[in-house]
Amino acid sequence: MKYKIINFQKHGDDRGMLVALEENKEIPFNIKRVYYMYDTVAGVRRGYHAHKKLQQILICIHGSCKIHLDDGFDTAEVVLDKQFQGLYVANNMWREMYDFSPDAVLMVLASEYYDESDYIRNYHEFLEYVRGEDLL
Ligand code: TYD
């Protein structure tokens, strides 16, 4: 499984909605870190990296955005516009985030602490890494 949309259970009643997430249950890993993006400037596209080890769940808890995914062989575009949906992204996946609505809040649950050495920030290097071959 390289990526997957997960529909979280909604606890709704006449007061409104609530979603609860627990590690190793709704979230298929230990949650070591949470970060979120907001006030994203119109037209910005960010990300442009892959991770060697890190797994993540992306949840657009307000507004909407799109995620471009690339495993080195196939690509996919995913729309995140529902507060009860999470996008699981495995390691070794190139990702770019774009089309943020002005009110978008993109929250990320991460399986590892922040570690710059886990990043692959060069697309060509990423392709060589996942394909296991020298492409030059
Ligand atoms: P960056 O990796 O450029 O964000 P993205 O790839 O999602 O567009 O991160 C922006 C800044 O935030 C950069 O200085 C590193 C810092 N940062 C942390 O300190 N901890 C974190 O967990 C993350 C994701 C970023």
Image: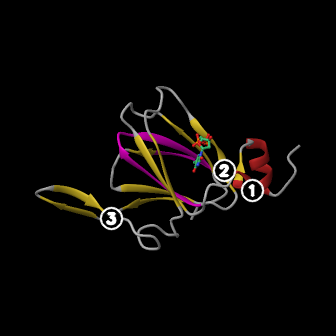
Q: Residue drawn at (79%, 46%), measured in percent from left and top?
A: 125
Asked if residue 73 shows in the view, the reply is no
Residue 50, numbered label:
2
Please name the residue that numbered disc 1 is placed on. Answer: 130
Q: CA distance from mark 2 to mark 1?
A: 10 Å
Q: Earlier in the sequence, mark 2 or mark 3?
A: 3
Q: Label 1 is placed on what type of residue? A: Val
The crowd level at tag 3 (other Cα within 10 Å; few <14, some 14-19, many 20+) is few
Q: Quadrant of the N terminus?
A: bottom right
- Looking at the picture, how far across and down is residue 105, in whole percent? 40, 42
Q: Secondary structure at mark 3?
A: loop
Q: What segment is highlighted magenta in the picture?
A: 55-78
Q: Residue drawn at (44%, 34%), measured in percent from left and top?
A: 100
- Let me know if residue 42 is in the magenta part: no
- Looking at the picture, how far across and down is residue 29, in whole percent? 52, 69
Please identify, in this view, whether the residue under mark 2 or under mark 3 is nearer the observer: 3
